[in-house]
Amino acid sequence: MARCKLTIKSDFGVPLNDLFGIFFEDLNHAADGGLYAEMVQNRSFEFEPVDHEGYHETYAWEINHPDQAVISSDQPLNSKNLHYLAVKSGAEDLTVTNRGFNQGMFVQEDHTYLFSMFASAKEKGMVQVFLENSQHQQLSPTAVIAVDVPGWKKYQVVIKANQDSIEGRLVVKILPNSHLNLDMISLFPTDTFHHRENGVRRDLGEALAAMHPKFMRFPGGCLVHDGTLDPNDRESMYRWKNTIGPVEKRPTRRNKWGYNQTLGLGYYEYFQLAEDLGAKPLPVLPGGHDPHHKRAVPIDQLQPWIDDALDLIEFANGDTDTKWGKKRAELGHPKPFGLEYLAIGNEEVGQAFFDRYPYFHKAIRERYPNIKLINTSGPFASGSEFDRGWKSAKENGSDFVDEHYYMSTDWFLANQHRYDHYDPKGPKAFLGEYASKENKWYNAVVEASYMTGLERNADKVGLACYAPLLANVDYIDWDPVLIFLNQHQIAPTVNYYVQQLFMTYQGTHNVQYSIDGLSDPVVKDDQPITGQFGFEGDLAEVTYNNVTFTDRKSGNQQDFNGGQLLERKRQLIGQTDSDDYTLSFDATKTGGRPDKGFHLIFGQASDPDYFMWVLGGWENQDSIIKQRGAHGMESDWDQCQWTMESDHQYHFDIHVHDRQITTSIDGHQFNEIEIMPTVIQPLYSNMTFDEKIKSYYLKLVNVTDKPVTILLKDTHFQNGQYRELSADPETENKIGESNNLKINKTTVDGSSIRVQPYSVNVLISK
Ligand code: AHR
């Protein structure tokens, strides 16, 4: 076993500032049915099939006499909340029961719940409210509400549960001969995180706070910019002004992720949450551009969008005598929220966004020169859109560029030195979304290894957050995530614990040090890209022909028959072991899915273990060089914007030289990328110092199955504290199970430590 010596060289390196934070987006029912503590689903009877197939206005409600309850919009609560339940009971009780999310509401004995509703009496009405379980056993005493005024009025009562249930229901019983209108029927635990009204779940809030994030990016993600230009549309882009003020006056929204979004968790609540977490708020505003649907506000109509940005800064930071600062104070927070960061756009691709960004940038800089502005560089780690974002950031003087990538563990290991070559004088990278593709311990350890590189390059990477954060296990749109949840449980994933460790022990500055005696890295994959090649359909109808393979070393050429593609079936046509070759072909799209194209397969060693040139990927907007590794995980190495028009014959060339890939379409160069080999270091590490508490932290990450011993003699870590996370590489945390990760908190015993296989560690100086 290697025994290596640690030497500390100089106390101060570059500052880490707000390096590690979190990113919250309402996907996977992360807000409604997740973090947002509202227990009623569809509280305002606004669910519609446009939000989600199968939704309707009484979705999640059960009504015992449906003929006595209708959805009406004749006398709405307000113009943003059109639908309500009009009930007219007969000689019997009429019960209206909500089942909440998942299998039901989580009700706990002796806990109190705040029931509220808006009601108006057409004649008169008595309402009883209580909790029950799915077997109709009552879980709380009955509260009685007399609805006695004709106009809309808010009624509230606190209900105390006398039994536990994970299948709780809220029952609103309308007594005989009542004639009422009901809306905004709501139930919240009174014990929310930091006891905020309209707040977030305590267990989730505490789990987030326990990470000690330096910042919180919100509210998305694609959620922000996928939408229409009109803020009054149900599916408009995420416009922050729609999300503040009384919850009953916030419009209902079709969430991009395929469900209804109440906006109950809105900008005020996000700012409040960030403050409660001790994290700096980092909002993302739409830049008047939706790359998903190629919508862009005309430049001469951009002002309201720019005003949204300026007003948001005033809302967060302005004095209480300013218009928006006053609004903040009226909502209950006279003190400014201390906004420092603001992102315009998310994963933007195409010139249209970058034509608009400068207008935002200039207006914000002029009025608020201290706000740090974040530009975007698309959803890929390399390629035309990535370059376009960085070019714009440099030209405009953005402070940060938001980079996003979701890649395989091999990609992260191959790209450990990505940021070593960034310019410390240029805009800093904000790694606003990243994750390796699974929630297994091996993924988490590899992410930890990558995070040591982020720390080491803190002069070039200013901010970084894993994505996404939360997923309700019964409504998953996107995983892996940091925390799985249902109504009564949460399961922090093994990846969560890595993030938590790095945030808790981030430190304020890097420290110069060396570890001598480590064995050489293992290079897993440095062979030329050779193997089988062919075509694969992707649901568009494509004809290919004039296929030629040229071995550029020998000059030999081989021609292949053409063919047709539609289904996702692979047609392998040839094989090579040359390290320098070109594949040329023509292809025409004749029908099938308009948002799709086809794939060229190459470098296939086995299945899965191959490369793809994805033509017409992501909504038919991309030319991507994708790798599907032996483990099945995919990485998009390089992306350029390209759309495959129908009925046009294109000529394609791909040139593979060793591990260098270049592509061209109709003679114009597109992708250019070197597929870096997977290099596995025996140990990944970084040392920081925390000025506030005068502590040194040494992170040690072992992604291998071999232990490493580090001699700590004459260093700050001798007899210091020691945190160790370890597990079998396949280990995962699942909802309902206890934590499968071994978490060891101990003191360094003597003058060396053994870094266990597959472990993430931090040593804390004495
Ligand atoms: O984090 C999930 C999604 O991934 C985000 O909404 C988007 O920005 C990215 O494509």
Image (spheres, rainbow, N blue to C red):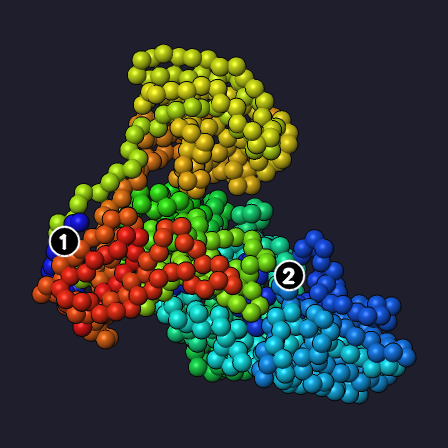
Q: Is residue 577 above or below residue 67?
A: above
Closer to the camera, 679 or 618?
679
- Contact? badges 2 and 1 (CB < 8 Å): no
Answer yes or no: is residue 426 visible. Answer: no
Is the CB of mark 2 within 8 Å of ligand 1?
no
Q: Residue 133 at what x, y percent from top left?
A: 68, 73
530 lies left or right of 52: left
Q: Nearer the viewer, mark 2 or mark 1?
A: 1
Residue annotated with mark 1: 4
Could you say which quadrant of the image residue 245 lies in? bottom right
Asked if residue 203 can be seen in this view, the reply is yes
Q: Residue furthest left?
A: 714
Nearer to the camera, 325 or 672: 672
Asked where in the image residue 206 lies, by quadrant, the reply is bottom left
- The residue that disc 2 covers is 260
The label on residue 330 is none
